[in-house]
Amino acid sequence: MIQPVQEIIGAVNYWVDQSGIAYSVRSHVEWACHQILKIRVPQTLVTDNVYMQMYRKGWMRVAILGDRINVDFSRMTGAQGDWLMNEVNTRQLPAIDDRNRTIMEPESPPQMAESVVDQLLS
């Protein structure tokens, strides 16, 4: 099983829904538990279950750092890809997935978001 990127202190954090709307969050786990899953925040450091529930619901997890944009998801929709491409180009940072692969780079052509989605769904 692929391990999701861990919560990164000091990152700019977002959850992005299937329609491409981004929600800025202080803590991915706390926000997901309170706003979407309606469960208590786990008392342990085990957060994978919370993340996996969000991914199954179609959410994309984003942590923007000084030199990259970390993304973690089950499937990326076209709207999520568009949002991510905009962030990549605006911030001039590459998007890196949970396998440490660069999935988008600044100045990438607009079709790249669609091709990334196609690759991830196949």
Image (cartoon, helix red, strand yellow):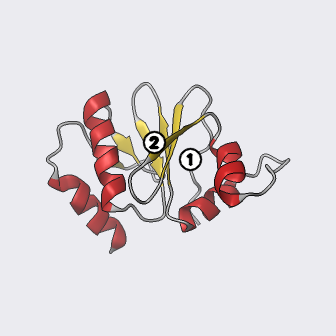
Name the N-terminal-most of marks 1 and 2: 1
Residue 105 or 1: which is nearer the viewer? 105
Q: Quadrant of the C terminus?
A: bottom left
The circle on residue 5 is 1
In x, y percent, where is residue 7?
62, 40
Q: How many marks?
A: 2
In x, y percent, where is residue 96?
39, 45
- Report whether residue 92 is seen: no
Q: Is residue 16 left or right of residue 1?
A: left
Q: Callout 2, which amino acid?
A: Asn
Q: Quadrant of the N terminus?
A: bottom right
Q: Residue at x 81, y 53 (%)?
A: 40
Residue extending farthest to the bottom is 122
- Report whether residue 94 is seen: yes
Whether residues under marks 1 and 2 lie with C-beta atoms below 8 angstroms apart, the answer is yes
Q: Residue at x 51, y 57 (%)?
A: 59
In x, y percent, where is residue 24?
52, 37
Q: Is residue 98 above or below residue 18?
A: above
Q: Residue at x 18, y 43 (%)?
A: 108
Residues at marks 1 and 2, CA–CA distance in whole angstroms: 7 Å
- Residue 87, quarter of picture: top left
Q: Residues within 10 Å of mark 2 (few under 14, many from 20)?
A: many
Q: Which residue is mark 2?
A: 70
Q: Is residue 106 above or below residue 78?
A: above
